[in-house]
Amino acid sequence: MSEVHAEVEKLDSSKVPVHPHTELFNRPTGWRRYYYHPITQVSMLGFVCFLGPGIFIALTGLGGGGQVNSKVQANASAILYATFAFFGLFSGSINNVLGPRWTLILGTLGYSLYIASFLVINIHPDASAFVIAAGAILGICAALLWTAQGSLMMSYPTEAQKGTFISIFWTIFNLGGVMGSAVAFGTSFNRTVSDIYVTFVGFLILTLVGVFLPLLMANPNKVIRTDGTHVNQVSYPSWKTEVSRLYVALKTDPWIIFLFPMFFASNYCFTWEYNNYNGAIFTIRARALNSLMSYTSQVFGSIFLGYFILDRKRVRRRVRAFYGWSLVFFVAFASHVWAYFYQKTYTRAEAMKDAYKIDIIEETYVAHVWVMIVHGLLDSMLQTYAYWLIGAMSNDPAKLAVFTGFCASILIKHHTDKSLQSAGAAGAWSTDAAGIPYMNIFLSTWCLMVGSMIFAAPMVYLRVTDHTDVEDETL
């Protein structure tokens, strides 16, 4: 064990005291050292979401799923997130029984079906029922995928590395949205129907590749953290015991309730951003370019908050938590103040007339695209901060699986308590499908985003400590 202890001394995470009864293990040698490295596994996890949810958000970012009539996409999204919210209550239990790799495989299947439904409706415009049914199935699959993703991403790193690992995952995941948006922009540049058809075919192929990628990932119980400790084993109790764990998780960590508004708001914002702003006042190719800029900014937002703020090793974890909270709160408030001055210039009725759409060659385009860029930064920063807060509460994958399944983002992303996150998204997409005025949806988004950060402040102050206690390691 002396070799491991010597290596631990060299790691930045060695500043975190190791419990005297913690057993340390030697890291594998040769190619296994790199394959079983936690960073490798988190990176592979990122590529799974790159090829599933990443392509999905590129489709969503087109506004109306790239359709002229966005009502079908809004209805599909509403039922998607409704089923997501319900099955997210139990997805943590399913993940503990099936294991994360098989849960990921089942989860990625829904994204291929959903992309295929948009390909079908482009060929048969009367196939809206198929799109809505695919949305319902994707809701179930997405609950499984994001629960497995959350339990793995927050169990592989040491305490000092959680922000960095979240940033690595979030960067790779959002590159899926970047690449998908780039493909959509290139194929829709001339704005022809056949180009949109080619875009959906490309998206479908990519998501099918993502279905098989989890088979290449290592079994979590073979992964050793960089400090020499094994990733905590996930137990497989009976279904009756699994149901009771939801209650136990809330009872042992009631502070998670203070994060519920943040989870609820994190996917609520996408309806206004992508349908009521991007989809309402821009041309098809401008929508694709806006999505590309938005998802690119999400990559930088996640890296900045995770690596430079939340994992600054010279600063205590409690202090980092307050730094992160202050930054996310400021960006949330400022970005919506800015967006308000654009939202008040148009209504839903005016946008539906389709008399004028902003194109990439217009003089006003540059000013308008910056709203998408700043909101993209906010999206990734909020998701990264939410994941980091949950990760600061425990290192046990079983406990984290319950938290991530019950609470939710995400970023859809990417991502947090997925049930509440999806309930918020379902409500937002339902209001859009019902034709609620854009300004009403925007104001509710603004209030939720800012209010959720205020509501989370007591949890940050009272629950986040400099180190995770030993009793927090198990459920």
Image: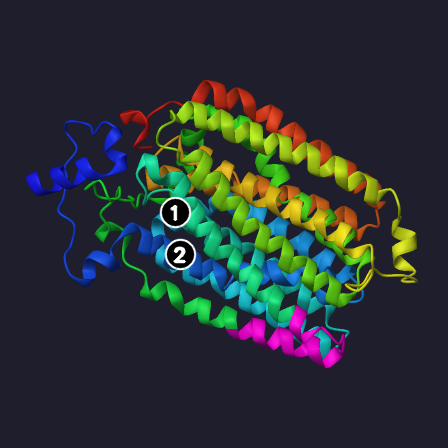
Q: Does residue 312 appear left or right of residue 297 in this picture? A: left
Three-letter amino acid code at the position of disc 1: Met
Position above or below: 201 against 24? below
Residue 204 on the magenta span: yes
Task: Farthest residue to the left: give it.
Answer: 2
| Magenta range | 185-205
Q: Does residue 164 appear left or right of residue 433 in this picture? A: left
Residue 148 on the magenta span: no
In the figure, residue 179 lies in which quadrant? bottom right
Disc 1/disc 2 C-alpha distance (Å): 8 Å
Q: Residue at x 64, y 38 (%)?
A: 265
Q: Would you name the residue on which mark 1 appears?
A: 153
Residue 299, position in %: x, y? Answer: 53, 51
Dot 1 lies on which element?
Answer: helix
Residue 266, position in %: x, y? Answer: 61, 41
Q: Residue at x 61, y 38 (%)?
A: 264
State whether residue 166 appears in this view.
yes
Q: Residues within 10 Å of mark 2 (few under 14, many from 20)?
A: many
Do labels 1 and 2 touch, CB within 8 Å? yes
Q: Would you name the residue on which mark 2 appears?
A: 45
In the figure, residue 335 lies in which quadrant? top right
Q: Of the residues under marks 1 and 2, which one precedes in the sequence?
A: 2
Residue 159, position in %: x, y? Answer: 33, 35
